[in-house]
Amino acid sequence: MGYFFTLLARFGIVLSMGTGMHLVFSLGGIFFLGMPTVVSLTAYALAIAEKAGYAPLWAAAIALLVNLCAGLLFAILYLRVSADSFAVLGLASILAFEALTRSWSELTNGVLGLAGIVRPELLAAEWSFGLFNLTLGILIVAGEYVLLQTFWGRALRALKENPVSLEALGISSDRLARNTIILSSLLFGIGSIVMVWQIQFLEPSFAGLMLLIEMLTVGILALKPEVKRVVGGAIFVIALPEFLRFLDLPVTLFGHLRVLLYSILLIVLIRFLNTKISITSRCL
């Protein structure tokens, strides 16, 4: 049963982060490659706050405040540079932040990482934590469904498909893009917090290219404005590597094969769905 509840927790995490990627990339057309940086920054804020003596819930509140600042920073950056430059800078931020966490050992404990991160007492058991994550993921997906039915949701779809029409209607595409980046960063941060609570350990490679590949896979599978595609993409991302557990392979190879599997999948998806993938163009 422990394995089952672990999968439930993992599913809730992917739903939370996948919804963020669905909003910003699939619907908004914003190539937000700095997503792992936001996840890592939020996670380290949580861990450092706990190590400083704050209770888990207070530490989570501090982490979300840091997350809000990170989302706002990326939103401002998006409005200052071209879409292509934003994608490149986001990717570069992943490597920069990982290098920072490795070298700033006084704060992050370097490559040894931070251990002993605790969950709230009510979520200490695997079953309660798994059900909490599943419920949280479902609520986030339901919230996105309601959001997409509103005027804001329709405007978000137009941001990628026809941004000129937004300006003609008096809607600022820059403001809409900024709010979308901040909202998606918040969802990435929520997923980051429960992800740290699940493994109760944090090290520099916690969120890197592997996580980005997973979330981009969900985003590409859910290109249409339908939340059921986010759910389907999350199930697919979780189930795909599970068959490796049933193969007689050395444990040391499992992680590398998982990365290879996701990478090949992403290449295949981009190859066959490249005509459906579009990025919002911006003129500075």
Image: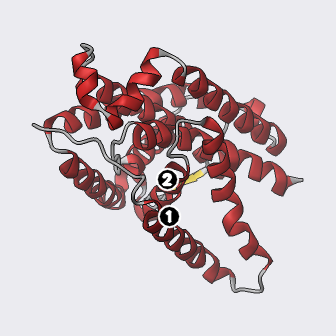
Residue at (42, 51) in percent of width and height:
36
The residue depicted at 29 percent of the width and 51 percent of the height is 90
Front position in the image: 138 or 122: 138
At a point 80% along the width and 77% down the height, the residue shown is 246
For the residue labelled by badge 2, is the local secondary structure a helix, a strand or a loop? helix
Residue 234 x/y as whole percent: 64, 50
CB atoms of marks 1 and 2 within 8 Å: yes
Front residue of 113/93: it is 93
Mark 1 secondary-structure assignment: helix
Compared to residue 245, the image places residue 150 above or below, namely above
The local crowd at label 2, few if under 14, some if 14 to 19, many if 20 or more residues have their Cα within 10 Å, is many
Relative to 180, residue 193 above or below? below
Viewer can see residue 66: no
Q: Which residue is mark 1?
A: 269
Front residue of 133 and 228: 228
**Residue 24 location, quadrant:** top left
Query: Disc 1 marks which amino acid?
Result: Leu
Q: Is residue 217 visible?
A: yes
Quadrant of image for the C terminus = top left
Give the residue drawn at x 36%, y 55%: 101
Sequence-first disc among 1 and 2:
2
Amino acid on which the number 2 mark rests in the picture: Ile
- Residue 251 on image: x %, y %: 68, 80
Q: Residues within 10 Å of mark 1 (few under 14, many from 20)?
A: some
Mark 2 = which residue? 220
Name the residue furthest top: 170
In the visual, does 57 lie left or right of 108? right
